[in-house]
Amino acid sequence: MNLSKSETLFTEAKKYIPGGVNSPVRAFKSVGGSPVFMQRGEGSKLFDVDGNEYVDYIGSWGPHLFGHNPSFIKDALLSSLENGTSFGAPTEAEVKMAKLITELVPSVEMVRMVNSGTEATMSAVRVARGYTGREKFIKFEGCYHGHADYFLIKAGSGALTFGVPTSPGVTSGNAADTLIADYNNIDSIKALVKENKNQIAAVIIEPVAGNMGTVRSTDEFVRELREICSEEKIVLIFDEVMTGFRLSKGGAQELLGITPDLSTFGKIIGGGLPVGAFGGKKEIMEFVSPQGPVYQAGTLSGNPLAMSAGLAVLSYIKENPDVYNKLEEKSKLLEDGFNENLKSLNKKFAFNRVGSMGTLFFTEQPVTDFNSAFTSDTKLYGKFFHEMLNRGIYLAPAQFEAFFISLSHTGEDLNKTIKAQYESLKAIL
Ligand SMILES: *Cc1c(COP(=O)(O)O)cnc(C)c1O
């Protein structure tokens, strides 16, 4: 495969942009090699600057539920563009958007639009702190909630010790207020709650995790988590930036049958534009300024172009509830093919799928949390990734990510992918 233009661009990019990219995982660091520069997306396909074609399973890291550049989103954007790009004043589209979100996700009674998932989670934790008057919060090892300082914390050595920053520039003060629990392990929550009685403002969780690869929380675990949060007056935040409008019209919370106090959204909600949102119980959201005392703002929040794309997506979902059955059908087809491949190659790699997101972990241990995910052979994944790329299949350039299936993936795409997987695994094992 000829990637010469991509390679030239990457060399040039590294002179002016740190690492040559505007978000780290795009740089292919964990799989080796040089990133592919894309030129155009259409449906399930991406086309790079050298003219190569790929079946895309990244979908811009989650947003493209309908594939690339569907005409109904493009039309909405073009007609909104006629009226201008930004007014810094309220618009009707924002009211429609907020109303539609509250209809699709019943736990959300009030919502505030922001510009990214990071802003949504950062603001949700701030509101939870303002509402409860408490400072600490709990996150889970392996869950990702964007790059606000107080999320870039991992567990220190030994349970119940202070968290430690995962990045220079994050203060120990931030780390001290972030408590780290183990995913799917209710005892780790109980211990932290006991140790920090009446000090915990919130628990934030990816109800189905996608950022350590795909890992589902167990029914029993989330049910107990919900109970503990209610008893202890801790705000339960579901970070649905990835799962919202992907796993069902009501997100992971509908799938799991659990009602969080606050939820955060991003990715799909913007139809490919930079959008995020946080919302939930009215009683809590009334603390957000200007109604309440917790400051939160944004020059481009609720931007008309972004709202038109988001509205197009959410309206489509509302009017076509069979979207999720179709996604499930496609995803099942891929899963069955993958399982067949693994069987005939006599490999018991863990394959997790929830709806249209999934991950093949290069470990034969079941993956239920960060530690089990971490037993994966990431070098082997890197080889697999390049074999797939050479066969025109564009997967995430890192083991601990999900693949996303869109409504635009055809039977032909999926069968091509299954065949490529078989050949790629055979080549590297
Ligand atoms: C992507 C993601 C974020 C961060 O969203 P950005 O738009 O990249 O800031 C937060 N939480 C989860 C679960 C995500 O998947």
Image: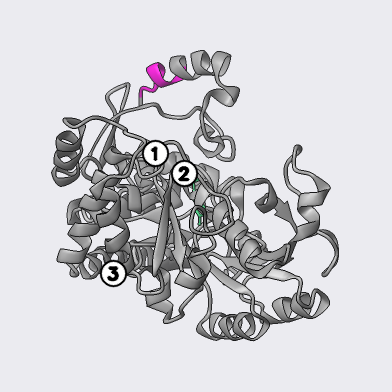
Q: What stretch is highlighted in magenta?
A: 2-7
* Residue to which mark 3 is pinned: 103
Q: Are circles 3 and 1 on residues that touch, CB within 8 Å? A: no
The residue at which mark 2 appears reads as 385
Q: Quadrant of the image for the N terminus?
A: top left
Check disc 2 and report its element: helix, strand or loop: helix
In-image side of 267 versus 198 (left or right): left
Instruction: Identify which amino acid the numbered label 1 is placed on.
Output: Leu
Q: What element carries label 3?
A: helix
Name the secondary structure under disc 1.
helix
Is 359 positioned to the left or the right of 96 in the image? right
Location of mark 1 (residue): 389
Q: Do the residues labelled 2 and 1 touch (CB within 8 Å)?
A: yes
Instruction: Provide residue 202's location: percent of width, then percent of height.
Output: 64, 68
Cα separation between marks 3 and 2: 40 Å
Give the residue at x 62% y 46%.
148
Residue at (51%, 73%) from the top-left corner?
261
The residue nearer to you, when weighing 128 against 356, is 128
Q: Does the magenta stretch include residue 154?
A: no
In the image, is 183 to the left or to the right of 117? Answer: right
Q: Which amino acid does label 2 sit on?
A: Phe
Query: In front: mark 3 or mark 1?
Result: 3
Q: Is residue 307 above or below residue 138?
A: above
Query: Whole-percent x and y of residue 329?
Result: 23, 68
The answer to which of 246 and 331 lies nearer the viewer is 246
Compute the Cα span from label 3 to label 1: 40 Å
Between disc 3 and disc 2, the foreground one is: 3
In front of the other: 101 or 268: 101
Q: Earlier in the sequence, mark 3 or mark 2?
A: 3
* Distance between the alpha carbons at the discs numbered 2 and 1: 6 Å
